[in-house]
């Protein structure tokens, strides 16, 4: 069996390729991102606020000498803000060549499953507005649905360029 970590939008395969995702919680929902995009998962350190930053940019951190922009996933998805808990984590991911941190409520596990188990997102959901194209599929995981995201589609080209200025 071939092992793949990538799930391409609109290309839900009916083969038996193995998909690997890191799952995380945000509000009451569970999301997954391809395991190869994740560089590391850390506790929330002190975040330096940046003046005039977009609303979803929490600030920046210094991670072993690299300045990493930190994005609030709750703000990015227009969810209600909550206080960080002992489960809150930052997932450091490669977004089109730029290391970026994403604050999530909790990181769950690495999930492995056959690509044939992925359902395409309903077209009504995808027509919901800007940013909806980052949802590449849905997986029925232990009695609840896991929403599969493509982090490379989370930001416009201009936003990725601005994030990359911190490299």
Image (cartoon, rainbow, N blue to C red):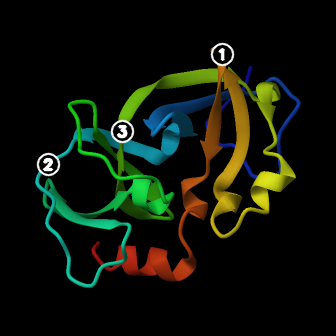
92 relative to 86 in the view: left or right: right
Left or right: 121 as drawn, with respect to 112: right
Where is residue 84, by image quadrant?
A: top left
Q: Quadrant of residue 66?
A: bottom left
Give the residue pinned by disc 2: 45
* Marking on residue 13: none
The kind of secondary structure element at disc 2 is loop
Counting residues from the start of the chain, the first of labels 1 and 3 encountered is 3
Q: Can you name the residue that lies furthest to the right here?
A: 14
The local secondary structure at tag 3 comes to: loop
- Marks 3 and 2: which is nearer the front? 3
Residue to which mark 3 is pinned:
105
Q: Which residue shows up at 38% across the image and 67% down it?
A: 56
Q: Nearer the viewer, mark 2 or mark 1?
A: 1
Residues at discs 2 and 1 in contact (Cβ within 8 Å): no
| Residue assigned mark 1 | 143
Q: Position of residue 61 (x, y in %)?
A: 18, 60
How busy is the neighbourhood of tag 1: few (under 14 within 10 Å), some, or many (20 plus)?
few
């Amino acid at each position: 069996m071939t092992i793949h970590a990538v799930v391409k939008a609109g290309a839900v395969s009916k083969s038996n390729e193995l998909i690997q995702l890191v799952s995380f919680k945000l509000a009451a929902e569970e999301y997954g991102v391809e395991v190869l995009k994740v560089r590391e998962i850390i506790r929330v350190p002190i975040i330096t606020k940046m003046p005039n930053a977009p609303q979803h940019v929490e600030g920046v951190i210094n991670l072993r000498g690299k300045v990493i922009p930190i994005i609030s996933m709750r703000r990015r998805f227009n969810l209600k803000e909550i206080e960080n808990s002992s489960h809150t984590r930052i997932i450091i991911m490669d977004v089109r060549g730029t290391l970026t941190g994403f604050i999530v409520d909790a990181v769950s596990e690495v999930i492995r499953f056959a690509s044939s188990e992925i359902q395409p997102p309903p077209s009504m959901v995808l027509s919901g507005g800007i940013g909806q194209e980052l949802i590449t599929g849905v997986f029925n995981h232990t009695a609840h649905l896991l929403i599969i995201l493509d982090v490379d589609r989370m930001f416009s080209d201009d936003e990725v360029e601005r994030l990359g200025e911190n490299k």
